[in-house]
Image (tube, rainbow, N blue to C red):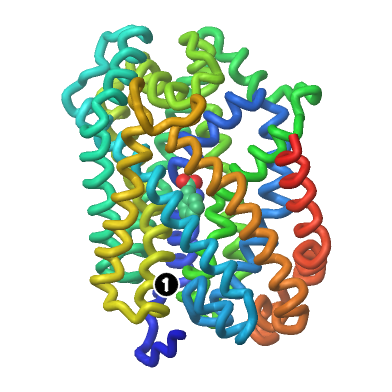
Amino acid sequence: MAEVKKKRDGFGSKLGIIAAAAGSAIGLGNIYRFPCEVGENGGAAFLLFYLIVVNLLGIPVMLSELVIGRRSQSNSVGAFHKLAPNTKWPIVGYIGVLCGFLIFAFYSTVSGWTLEYIVKSVTNSFHGKDLATIESEFAAFHDMGWRNVMWQGIFIFLTGFVVFRGVQNGIEKTAKVLMPLLLGILIILGIRSMTLPGAKEGLSFLFRPDFSKITGKVMVEALGQGFFSLSLGMGVLITYGSYVKKEDNLTSTAFSVVIADTAIAILAGLVIFPAAFSFGVKPEAGMGLVFNTLPMLFNQITGGYWFCLIFFVLLAIAALTSTISLLEVLVAYLSEEMLLKRTWATVIACAGTMLLGVFASLSLMSETPFALAGHTVFDMMDFLSSNILLPIGGVLIVIFVGWRLGKQKFFEEVTNEGALKAPLKRIIFFIIRYLAPVAIAIVFISGLIK
Ligand code: PHE
């Protein structure tokens, strides 16, 4: 077990933890996965349930993770060793580490695409093309399996490079610059998208719920998407929480991150759906929904060349601040529990992810051997991590805080030993102890039965 005596690296400022946690939360999950999920699960009905999940469960689960991290000053496995010695609780941390590998492996595939699309933007390759051409080029790109693997490798390398430089230098600085820029460009794109002919249909798809569409599957998908988008249930926020200073306000951090993440997801929906309906891209088009609709949208904008380029650069950086957090979970575990040097921990975690990730990338080719009954390895990794491991991790984390750590220690942590009021602490603790475990379990089990 880790008894790391040297001073741990940490975040430099209050804005640092919010930027880093929001950087982890905001990523392809918001701009790529969220529209796909909304599109495949019937639009507004999914959105409604998603909003309930992130508000009611997201904040308590996030706060639980931050509390565990800051109190233990440890990585996601070591945290449970410290707070519950000689118990089985560290398993929760191991699930998180496993989940980190899985998510990083398929997430880096799509992250790699952002690099391909940056190159396409620079060479102005979408200019004047119609939807059919853009779609066929996207499909052709998937069939170049090794080209996908190459970009994936470059992306994993970039992530390793930032993480290697350490928390304050790498993660915090990268995250701080990006968010306002991303927000700005999404607002401009959203305005253009909503003023396209036929955009209204996209808006009502997103906002007018058809309640008959809320099924067990939709609920599980929304739960999984909520956890995925907020980076919950696998130890990112335990690890980041361990770098937070004693004076920082954990509750307001959790609120800020959830609000920022939700705002970006909805904005992404406002960019994608009006445009998709206007151009005739099907809402259930999955991966193509984003990667085909956006180039079409850029073709409709004055200065589209620059918007396209800036957008994909920002998307790549948003993905990077998320992969950084995934890798940080692995590196913190390997360096503190396995006592590896940070450099070696980074190299080993990146190499392991790459090995797994190759299968995710190659499974998207049309003639791939890496698929079973129509389900690609990519989809299986996504499903297993987002819809199964994250909710299980989330449930165990709230049970840990609600029943094992207990009210008094939770209050101590959220009030900074009495220095803060934290007026919502009672209600949040009630949700952590009773509501969240039951709610997550019901949604999860009902979805699985189906
Ligand atoms: N939340 C990230 C996103 O939305 C993905 C992620 C999931 C990152 C889990 C870390 C942990 O893109």
Task: Give me the residue at 53% from left, 48% from top.
Answer: 385
Depicted 124 relative to depicted 106: above or below: above
How many other residues sit within 10 Å of disc 1, few (<14), some (14-19) or many (≥20)? many
Q: Is residue 98 above or below residue 32?
A: below
Q: Nearer the viewer, residue 195 or 201?
A: 201
**Above/below status of 383 relative to 133:** below
Amino acid tagged 1: Tyr
Q: Is residue 17 above or below residue 157?
A: below
Return the residue found at the far left. 123
Asked where in the image residue 368 lies, by quadrant, the reply is top left
Q: How many numbered marks, from 0 up? A: 1
- Find residue 52 and report its horizontal and vertical position in percent: 73, 44
Q: Does 161 sit left or right of 94 as displayed?
A: left
Which of the two residues, 179 or 352, is positioned nearer the viewer here?
352
Q: Is residue 21 visible?
A: yes
Q: Nearer the viewer, residue 150 or 49?
A: 150
Q: Which quarter of the image is occupied by the C terminus?
A: top right
Residue on which the image places disc 1? 333
Percent across and percent down for residue 427 are: 81, 65
Q: x, y (%) of residue 434? A: 83, 63
Q: Residue 299 in the image: x percent, y percent? A: 33, 15
